[in-house]
Image (tube, rainbow, N blue to C red):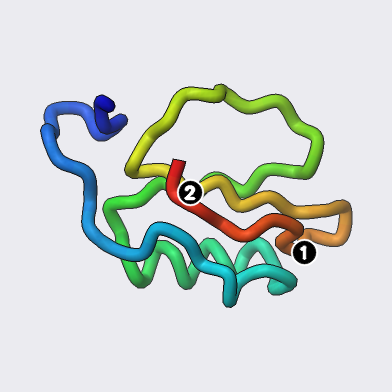
């Protein structure tokens, strides 16, 4: 497993999943994730949008619906 942070050899520490963010707004989820771990990338992605399928331990996909509500539990990957 290679982390996606250029020049690093270890993954950032922190939570692996955030079930408490399910059902919140995407922007709120992003703010919480970035506050808890600024080393993690957290792109907000509309449900159904194709994304790269590689595993990155420094990325959390924030999946939202048309109303910008989080529709999947945000997890590292």
Q: Examine the image and state in which quarter residue 16 appears.
A: bottom left
Residue 76 in the figure: left or right of residue 66: left
**Going by the picture, which residue comes out furthest to the right?**
66
Task: Give the crowd class for mark 2: few <14, some 14-19, many >=20 residues within 10 Å.
Answer: many
Where is the C terminus found, in terms of image quarters? top left
Q: Position of residue 59 (x, y in %)?
A: 42, 43
Residue 5 vertical placement versus 31 (above, below): above
Q: Is residue 48 left or right of residue 41?
A: right
13 or 43, which is in the foreground?
A: 13
Residue bearing the label numbered 1: 69
Report whether 37 appears left or right of 67. Answer: left
Which residue is disc 2 drawn over?
60
Image quadrant holding the N terminus, namely top left
* Secondary structure state at the residue bearing disc 2: loop
Q: Identify the residue shown where x is 30% and y is 59%.
A: 38
User: Which residue is at a point 57% across and 67% down the rendered structure image?
Assistant: 29
At a point 46% along the width and 24% down the height, the residue shown is 54
1 and 2 marks in contact (CB < 8 Å): no
Which residue appears at 69% of the width and 56% of the height? 72
- Mark 1 closeness class: few <14, some 14–19, many ≥20 residues within 10 Å: many
**Coordinates of residue 57 in the picture (x, y in percent):** 34, 41
Query: For the residues marked 1 and 2, what is the alpha-carbon distance in whole angstroms?
Result: 15 Å
User: x and y percent of residue 31 in the render?
Assistant: 49, 68
Secondary element type, mark 1: loop
- Above or below, 23 against 55 in this view is below
Q: Is residue 54 left or right of residue 28?
A: left
Badge 1 or badge 2: first in the primary sequence: 2
Q: Position of residue 4 (x, y in %)?
A: 30, 30
- The answer to whether 45 is drawn above or below residue 71 in the figure is above
Q: Nearer the viewer, residue 67 or 77?
A: 77
């Amino acid at each position: 497993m290679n982390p996606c942070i250029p020049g690093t050899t270890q993954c950032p520490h922190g939570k692996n999943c955030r079930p408490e963010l399910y059902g919140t707004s995407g922007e709120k989820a992003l703010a919480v994730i970035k506050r808890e771990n600024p080393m993690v990338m957290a792109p907000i992605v509309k449900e159904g949008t194709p994304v790269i399928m590689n595993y990155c331990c420094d990325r959390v996909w924030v999946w939202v619906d048309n109303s910008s509500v989080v529709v999947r539990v945000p997890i590292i990957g």
